[in-house]
Amino acid sequence: MPELPEVENVRRTLCGGLLGRPIYRVRVLRSDVVHGQTGPAGLLCGQKISSIERRGKQLALVGENGRCVCIHLGMTGALVLAAARQSRPEHTHVIWSLPGRQLRFQDPRRFGGIWTFSHHSQLSEQRWRNLGHDALSIRSCELMKRLARTRRCIKAALLDQGIIAGLGNIYVDELLFSCRLNPFCPASTLQGKQIQRLVRHMRQLLRRAIAAGGSTLRDYVDAHGHRGSYQSQHRVYGRATKPCVRCHQCLSVATVGGRRTVWCSHCQIP
DNA sequence: ACGATACCCTGATGGC
DNA sequence: TGCCATCAGGGTATCG
């Protein structure tokens, strides 16, 4: 379940193997994961990649000619750099060939996908237009404006990529525990000081998770195939009914915003 | 217009 | 051992 820290690690580990190298062949093994210009040129064939960007949980490979390939990993997607002779795992849907290596998009569940754009501006104006600011760079005043406009609880609001981009179920639960906010708290009732605190805790949480290589629960790996280790520092996610690390009371569990939610009803006061 | 819900999909898991 | 039901969840479509 790649969220911002995992996607950022994919981005960083892709850079060394991709930037400035020419793509000389693209093979699409499952065409329904690619949207837009699905031909080789649309997928950057013949191009060198000049930059790799991230917004929230989405990545964009930017070609020298300005063409863009946006990749969303969904639940089980992975972008892996491998030697061409290395055996190809099941559910490999797209292969980019570069000198001495391949970039492979694999995604068993196919919640992820690939979208092509003839220019970066098209990506910004179409696909990324509806995303909120990135969770690593959002300012508290901006988040406050967005939260004031919704009647949903804070958990559901933080999961909404249109409000803030990059958080998923793991890091929202960890964040709310970290700053002692109750997931059921109506988002619009949060005070300025509380939101400033939330943003501070969020940056710290995400930076630490990135430094640990992200969280690997089942199948997340970075572009080199390495797993993350931040899961060992989770304090609430995946710990339903276990004792709270702060007060030792049983952690609560419920469905909030359609997602399994774990919190401490003692430490995270409504 | 907003918010809640169903659905997409596969693999892991647990019960019988 | 094998089979089936259940669960996980990011995003989108649909309904109220």
Image (cartoon, coloured by chain):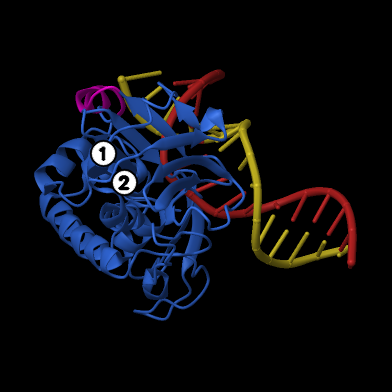
Chain colours: A blue, B yellow, C red
Q: CA distance from mark 2 to mark 1?
A: 36 Å
- Magenta range is A118-127
Give the class, few, some or many, for how many residues have Cα within 10 Å of label 2's Cα (few <14, many ≥20): many
Could you say where residue A33 lies in the image, as x and y percent from the top left? 51, 32
Could you say where residue A169 lies in the image, as x and y percent from the top left? 41, 53
Q: Quarter of the image for the C terminus of chain A: give it.
A: bottom left
Could you say where residue A97 lies in the image, as x and y percent from the top left? 42, 43
Q: Residue at x 36, y 25 (%)?
A: A41
Residue A125 has which mark?
none
Q: Residue at x 42, y 36 (%)?
A: A25
Q: Is residue A136 above or below residue A30?
A: below
Residue A158 has which mark?
2
Q: Taken as a whole, is the magenta stretch helix, strand or loop?
A: helix
Q: For residue A32, which quarter of the picture?
A: top right
Is residue A126 part of the magenta span, yes or no? yes
Q: For residue A234, which quarter of the picture?
A: bottom left
Q: Chain of mark 2?
A: A
Q: Determine if residue A182 is in view.
A: no
Q: Is residue A253 above or below residue A146?
A: below
Is residue A267 part of the magenta span, yes or no? no
* Circle 2: element type: helix
Which one is nearer the viewer's eye here, A30 or A267? A30
Which residue in the structure is indicated by mark 1? A48
Could you say where residue A221 lies in the image, as x and y percent from the top left? 44, 60
**Badge 2 amino acid:** Leu
